Image (cartoon, rainbow, N blue to C red):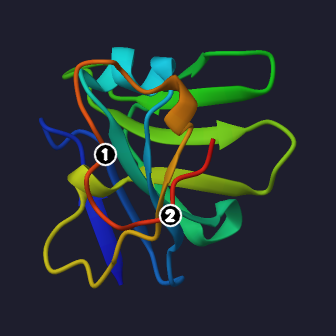
Amino acid sequence: MTRGHCLCGAIRFETEASPQAASVCHCSQCRRQSGHLWASATVSKATLTISGPIKWFDSSKTAQRGFCPTCGTFLFWHAHAEDTISFSLGALENPTGITLEKHIFCDDKGDYYEITDALPQKA
């Protein structure tokens, strides 16, 4: 079981599914919302149970971001046309058993840092 929660604990989530596509996102939206970059993993939306007062924000025409309206923790990313959902790796309870697989939106990364590990980098 993979479990996580926001900073204040008002929102909790869990899944029995094995998370896939664990990645670090360098897009400008994730950097703005998180303060640097965002690490997440993906599961089928049907396998993720979310409890609490989640607030959804349409961050683009194609996707939305879920966060806690009390503490502001950014927890979820969901593309409108997909049946999957990504959740924040930083919100998980340890041990996670998850290993990062790649970096995404690397062409959009900030100019103030370099990606120095050996993981694949997607444009």
Quarter of the view holding residue 13? bottom left
Residue 76 marker: none
Q: Secondary structure at mark 2?
A: loop
Residue 120 marker: 2
Q: What residue do we see at 49% from left, 31% from top?
A: 66
- 14 relative to 12 in the view: left or right: right
Q: Which amino acid is tagged 2? A: Pro
Q: Position of residue 57 (x, y in %)?
A: 57, 17
Q: Position of residue 115 (x, y in %)?
A: 31, 45
The residue lying toward the viewer, choosing from 102 and 76, is 102
As drawn, 1 above or below 9: below
Whichever of callouts 1 and 2 sits on the residue coming sooner in the sequence is 1
Q: What residue do we see at 44% from left, 34% from top?
A: 26
Quarter of the view holding residue 81? top right
Q: What residue do we see at 19% from left, 23% from top?
A: 71
Name the quadrant of the N terminus. Answer: bottom left
Binning the other alpha carbons within 10 Å of mark 2 as few (below 14), some (14 to 19) or many (20 upward) gives few
Q: Position of residue 101 (x, y in %)?
A: 46, 70
- 122 relative to 37 in the view: left or right: right
As drawn, 94 above or below 123: below
Question: Label 1 belongs to which residue?
Answer: 115
Proximity of marks 1 and 2: CB atoms separated by less than 8 Å: no
As drawn, 25 above or below 86: above
- 60 relative to 9 in the view: left or right: right
Farthest residue, direction right = 81
As drawn, 27 above or below 80: above
Q: Which amino acid is tagged 1? A: Ile
Quarter of the view holding residue 75? top left
Binning the other alpha carbons within 10 Å of mark 1 as few (below 14), some (14 to 19) or many (20 upward) gives few
The residue lying toward the viewer, choosing from 92 and 121, is 121
